[in-house]
Image: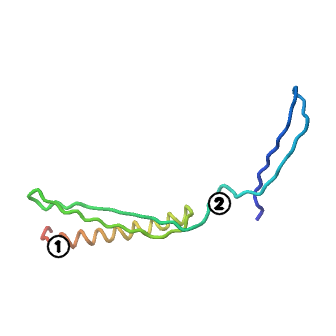
Amino acid sequence: MRTPEANATVERRRAGKSEGAATATKGVSAPHEPEVGPCEVYFSRSATLNLGNYESMKIEVSLKMPALATPSGVERAFTVARTWVDAKLEAEIGGAKEGLGLE
């Protein structure tokens, strides 16, 4: 794969006439190739259950997990985190309702 290049040209003009020019070329990272490294994705959801008599119970589930620092890596980690948190929250809500006799 060919490395992208950036060119810079400097031209000196005096009274509208060119007195010389210099061009420099340098290899650069492509803008669409993000730096790859570790990062973390955090996802959290909560639900509040009405217990009656002006009382409530808040249930919160969160997950922080490592991800590859690319758009697709972060998206994959986010999808995994969201799926796990949603399933765990539903299970916790069901258990709390059952334990409190709310169903």
- Which of disc 2 and disc 1 is earlier in sequence? 2
Horizontal side, residue 18 vs residue 6: left or right: right
Q: Quadrant of residue 18?
A: top right
| Crowd around label 1: few <14 · some 14–19 · many ≥20 (10 Å) | few
**Is 102 placed above or below 17 here?**
below
Outermost residue toward the left? 53
Circles 1 and 2, Cβ within 8 Å, touching? The answer is no
Q: Please, which colouring scheme is shown?
A: rainbow
Badge 2 marks a residue whose secondary structure is loop
Horizontal side, residue 48 vs residue 61: left or right: left
The picture places residue 10, in percent across and down from the top left corner, at 82, 41
| CA gap, disc 1 and disc 2 | 50 Å
Q: Residue at x 55, y 61 (%)?
A: 71
* Residue 17 tag number: none
Q: Quadrant of residue 89?
A: bottom left
Amino acid found under the numbered disc labelled 1? Glu
Q: Residue at x 88, y 25 (%)?
A: 15
* Residue identified by numbered label 2: 33
Nearest the eye: 28 or 31? 28
Q: Residue at x 54, y 66 (%)?
A: 73
Nearest the eye: 98 or 12? 12
The picture places residue 34, in percent across and down from the top left corner, at 62, 60
* Residue identified by numbered label 1: 98
